[in-house]
Image: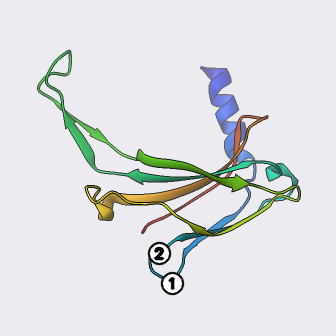
Amino acid sequence: RAAAMAAIGRAAATPKAPIVLGWTTTSPRRLTVQMTGGASAAGAVGIAAVVEDGLSVPVRRGENSGQTLQHSAVTRRLVEIGRVDRSGNFSHAGVRLDVDPSWRTSNLRFVVLAYAEGRHQIVAAATVTP
């Protein structure tokens, strides 16, 4: 446990590349992504997700039978949006993240992260509401 906590502490202390998120003004609205990450982000995979908070599930069987489990940040959609270039920069002017009509828009967030595959690290992350 101590080794895991130390690794988490080191990862949290490592500076992350800044990501700026915004929305296009045209319809349908699309997410804009701008990142200037430097060498630490070079080659990372850009990933966008739609997550929903405030979900609950009634449990009908098993040890939690009769209880209602609360969930937050449930991933509703996850898409790869590109790769960070060699200098650590990334730009995407129109990420399309379709929202299912059954999802509660007021509980949604859009998350963008840059994942360095070879190092198994998140080198940048940002979130925005619709």
Q: Nearer the viewer, residue 124 or 22?
A: 22
Left or right of 128? Residue 54 is: left
Within 10 Å of the Cα at label 1, are there few (<14), some (14-19), or many (20+) other Cα atoms? Answer: few
Q: Which residue is mark 2?
A: 29
How many residues crowd mark 2 within 10 Å: few (<14), some (14–19), many (20+)?
some
Q: The N terminus is located in which quarter?
A: top right
Q: Which scheme is used to colour this image of the protein?
A: rainbow
- Residue 33 x/y as whole percent: 64, 67
Residue at the farthest bottom position: 25
* Number of numbered discs visible in the structure rendering: 2
Q: Disc 1 on helix, strand or loop? A: loop
For this orientation, the residue located farthest to the top is 62
Where is residue 91 drawn, in percent x and y? 71, 67
Q: Is residue 21 above or below residue 110?
A: below
Identified by mark 2, the residue type is Arg
Task: Measure the alpha-carbon separation of dots 2 and 1.
Answer: 6 Å
For disc 1, the marked residue is 25
Q: Which residue is drawn at the image coordinates 27% and 40% (left, top)?
A: 70
Residue drawn at point x = 83 percent, y = 51 percent: 42
Label pair 2/1, CB-CB below 8 angstroms = yes
Q: Secondary structure at mark 2?
A: loop
> What residue is shown at x 31% (from left), y 64% (from top)?
106
Image quadrant in which you'd find residue 28: bottom left
The residue depicted at 51 percent of the width and 84 percent of the height is 25
The image quarter in which residue 126 lies? bottom right
Residue 115 location, quadrant: top right
